[in-house]
Image (cartoon, grey):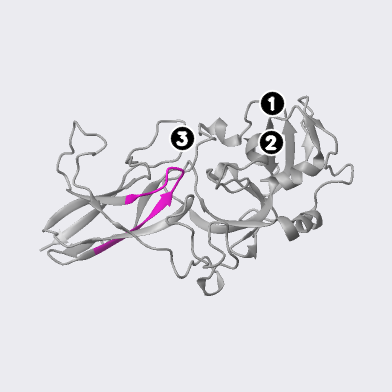
Amino acid sequence: MIADPDSNAKVANPLAKQRGTALDWKGLMKLAETRAVRYLQVMTCTNVSGPMGMGLWEGVPLREAIWPARPTGNVRRVFYYGYHNDDPAQRFQSSLPIGRVLEDPPGEHPVILCYRLNGRWLTPKAGAPVRMIVPNAYGNKSVKWLQRVVLTNDPKANDTYARWNNDTVSAVKTCARFLHVPKSAKAAQPVAITGLAQVGISGLSKVQVWLHPAGAPLPGDDPHFTKADWRDAEILPPPEEWGGDLPGGKLPAIPRQFDPKTGKPRNWPLHNTIAHWAVLLTDLRPGHYDLRCRTIDANGHAQPMPRPFPKSGRNAIQHVRLAVEP
């Protein structure tokens, strides 16, 4: 936790290896005794079409490690990077405004120095021993194998992903994806379709599906399919078993989003997590169909199409093919 030597940031008590004051594992665990927090967070990337998974992340708020360094002036951003390999061109780094690190919006979770996932120590693949977890952000902010944190007066972000045409300040989007769609079905017999929804900053009120005859022309005057025959799916309740190799599928400790008295989520679906959905199709006729899914966010807006480049999280309508036999 040092001042950027290329700016005029001021830090009265640098936490540096050369001074023998760096925050080491023992020091982090000491902070964890009284400052540890846990929350569920989806892990997703601006470069892929859907979420990679969700986990219960545990760590110490980054601010708890910054205050002992005693920043005294000219600090606008926090730069940080992790060890990826020995090629300097592949050093993964990111940055945040100092205000987001030191203060959390109401109801938001802190940026954390994370050391546990689903109640277990991080594995090397997951970023051990310590990685950053930034809530409400895509994975490029949550740098693995954390090495150094630098306080700077530089107003510009220095994120690696920005060089690859990514919007590095994009908040997680709300979108829907299919999980199980049979390749074929029998006409007039019910077919269960399941999927997941990534619940982003805009929340989630509905998941909808649309069945369209394959090969039939799409409406040229309605590129976002606003007039299509969308059907509401059912958003499933919180699971009894959370998976993730958790013993018995149970969460090992009460996350911030849960009521400590009941052990249940304070609301559902939770922001920045994954919810599952299902729909039962009962009126299928013989033919081939394109099945599409989309979300309606908490503000009532459909989220059907991807934003333009730079890449900012792909929330395009997903579609799959379904064959209905006589």
Q: Which mark is residue 79?
A: 2
Q: Quadrant of residue 128?
A: bottom right
Task: Tell me what residue is drawn at x 53 percent, y 60 percent.
Answer: 258
The verdict on residue 205 being magenta is yes
CB within 8 Å, label 2 to label 1: yes
* Residue position marked by numbered label 1 in the rendering: 154
Q: Position of residue 226 (x, y in %)?
A: 23, 39
CB within 8 Å, label 1 to label 3: no
Tell me the element at label 1.
loop
Where's the C terminus, which quadrant?
bottom left
In the rendered structure, the answer to whether residue 120 lies left or right of residue 196 reads right
* Residue position marked by numbered label 3 in the rendering: 311
- CA gap, disc 2 to disc 1? 9 Å
Residue extending furthest toward the bottom: 248
Q: Quadrant of residue 122?
A: bottom right
Q: Which residues are magenta?
A: 192-206
Q: Position of residue 114 (x, y in %)?
A: 66, 53
